Structure formats: structure tokens, C-alpha cells
Image (cartoon, helix red, strand yellow):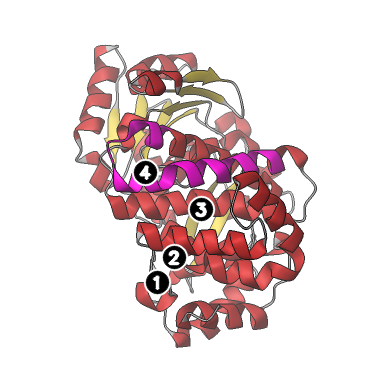
Amino acid sequence: MEELASLAGNWGYPTSIRFGAGRVRELPDACRELGVERPLLVTDPGVAALPMVAGAVDACEEAGLDCAVFADVRGNPIEANVRSGVAAFRAGDHDGVIAFGGGSALDTGKAIALMVGQSRPIWDFEDREDWWTRVDEAGMAPVVAVPTTSGTGSETGRASAITDTRGDYVKRIIFHPAMMPGRVILDPELTAGLPADLTAAVGMDALSHSLEAFSSPVFHPLAQGIALEGIRLVREALPAAVEDGADLAARARMQVAASMGSTAFQKGLGAMHSLSHPCGAVLDTHHGLTNAVVMPYVLAFNRPAIEERMAALGRYLGLPDPSFAGVLDWVLGLRERIGIPHTLKEIGVEEPHAHQLAPMAAIDPSSPTNPVPLDAENLEALYLRAINGVL
């Protein structure tokens, strides 16, 4: 308990964060600090049925806040989820959003808060060129983010991943700097009930964010340092969090690692996400799990450009073999220990999908910052290697 007590704090970077066990009780205070009196709590159907949501709503109502719940959110959110949420926000005369849950709920909540005051379609705000400048920032609603998983780090991100269902399904990144939640509550007690398999999948998502940011060739020393420590926290805490869900110290470290990952990837992502996004859009695979599966294949593909950087990572992690091979062996061992499948075939991606998904991966916004240039041809080959387990 003494160790857990030390894992708490109030931070002002990259946004205002309350971190520590039991701090969800401060949700009404966080709302009021943003001027929110009538919050719409956005979550997914699974989380909506849990006592933690009822407790959050009760706490808000006891504090005099008029809180309603919106839970029409898919695991890979689509535009219709955002439209329905905007309608609920307006119908209830809400003045802010509580984004409560995993990455899908956080992304949807942030997108609803963006869209409540816009006259243009959501796709006009895709993360391309300067499209974010089209947003009527005065129309955006404030957001309090309360993650219940430790993976996407969307609570400290300035974007939402939303699937475009017009024609071929495509996962698009909707971006505006003010989409960063104004208040964040990181309470490890909210993650303690997460099953081991989901803890593993979302934890590997956090690792993928920091690992891809660390590998990105973009010059951003601040993000580089955050990525490095985020990876170390995952190494320290993820196995323990998977093996003992009640280990709140491990859960707390993983929450911080997730927030660090999304902060770090301002430096850019890469082929792990380029490959994963089309799988999620077309085949509805779990995002974090897909990143976890493709991770070693992408590392091997990028080896010529990242070998020295991986050796530096190995030294920081204190690996027995501080080299590219040592880092790859650690990733493979971690995946095996926590039950991550070795191939994309095991999660429903088959060889014919490679040719279909590769062109989508090539134009994914994560592709330009991969250390090795990407195109449809080498991405199709990467898909096939990950499908068939060829490192």
C-alpha cells in the first residue's frame, strides 16, 4: 500500500491530470473546473453496464450535475456513433462531455465534443495538411477523460480514430489541437477488473505507440525521451498487470505508460499502425491486439534504419543483449508470456486480405513517419509475413 500511495500526483503536462487510486471521486470537481454542469457521459455498452459508470453518474448527480449516459459506441467507432452522440448532446442540452472507458469511448467522446458546434461534416477535419483550421473552435465542448483501460492513451491525445463507412471502410484520424481533454483522471482502480487478455492487448498498444515514436526519424527530443521511459514502464508493469489484475501498482504504471505513449507519438507512428488501421476498419479486429501481432514483423522490416536506436533502447532497458536482436527477443518473449497470438491469421486476417488492405495501409497517416519508406508493395509483403508467421 505504501508503494501505491506514492503512485499519485497532480500533473499539468500534457494537460491537467489527476493520477492515483480512487481519484474518480473527483470527477464532479473536474467537470466544474471546465464550467460543465450538464455533462454527457460517453462510454461503450459493456462499460455502461458496470457499477463504475453508475457510481460516476451518482457522484455527478450528488454534486448537483445533471449527467446522462450515451453508450452507442462500437469497438471501432464509426461516424454514425458520433452523429448519434451529437444528437443526444443537443437533445439533452448538455454543455460538456465525460469520455469514460477504453479507446473507442474516449475517441468517440472527443469527436462528439468537436462536432457539436460544427456545420461541416466530420471528414472535413481529417488529419491532412491544415484541415484542422476549418474547425469552429468556439463551438467545441469541453472534455473530461476517464480511461478504464491502459492502451490507446486517447486521454492525452489531440485526435480520434473514426471509421468512414462510405464505400470501402477506412479508419480516418480526426484532429484538432483543442481535442486534447481539458481534464484527465487516471484512476488505476477503474482498470482492475479488465480481463487478462484485454489487459495484454491494450498494454501492447501502449508499447506500440512508444516504440513507433522512438523509431520515427522525426526530430522531437521531448517526445523521444517520453517514448523511452514509456517503453521501460511497459516492460516493468505489463506482465504483472496481466498475471495479477489486482496489482494496482502495476495497473497505475500501465496507465501512465499509456498516456505517455500518446504524448510521444506527436513524433509520429509507423507501419504497425499503418497495417493495423485497415484491419480494424475492414475486419473489425481489436486495434491493440493487431498492433501487438504485427510488432515484431515491423521491427524486422525496419531493422536497417533502426538498428543503432534499438541498441540504445536495449541499454536503457538493461537487456542482457543490448542490441536489435535483444530488443526483438524481448518483444517476442513478452508477447508469448502474456498470450499474444503470433500471426495475423490467428485473428482472422487471411492471405487474400493482404492485397486488399495494402493500398489502404500505404495512404494511412501513420505511414510517412515509418523509418523505412512504405508503399503498397512492401506493405503487402509485410501483411503476408505477419499472416504466415515469417520473421
* Quarter of the N terminus within the rendering: top left
- Mark 3, Cα crowd under 10 Å, few <14 / some 14-19 / many 20+, is many
Q: Amino acid at mark 2?
A: Gly
**Is residue 216 at least partly visible in the picture?**
no
Mark 1 and mark 4 residues within 8 Å of each other at the beta carbon: no
Q: Which residue is mark 4?
A: 240
Q: Is residue 153 above or below residue 351?
A: above
Residue at image position (54%, 85%) is: 355
Q: Is residue 231 left or right of residue 351?
A: right
Of callouts 1 and 4, the N-terminal one = 4
Q: Where residue 280 is drawn, which disc sits there?
A: 2
Q: Where residue 53 is drawn, which disc sits there?
A: none
Q: Magenta stretch? A: 224-252
Q: Is residue 55 left or right of residue 305?
A: left
The location of residue 332, given as percent across then percent down, is 49, 64
- Is 215 magenta? The answer is no
Label 2 vs label 1: CA separation? Answer: 6 Å
Q: Is residue 44 above or below residue 368?
A: above
The location of residue 312, given as percent across then percent down, is 71, 51
Q: Amino acid at mark 1?
A: Leu
Label 1: element kind: helix
Q: Which residue is mark 3?
A: 161
Q: Which residue is mark 1?
A: 283
Q: Is residue 93 above or below residue 10?
A: below
The location of residue 268, given as percent across then percent down, is 68, 52
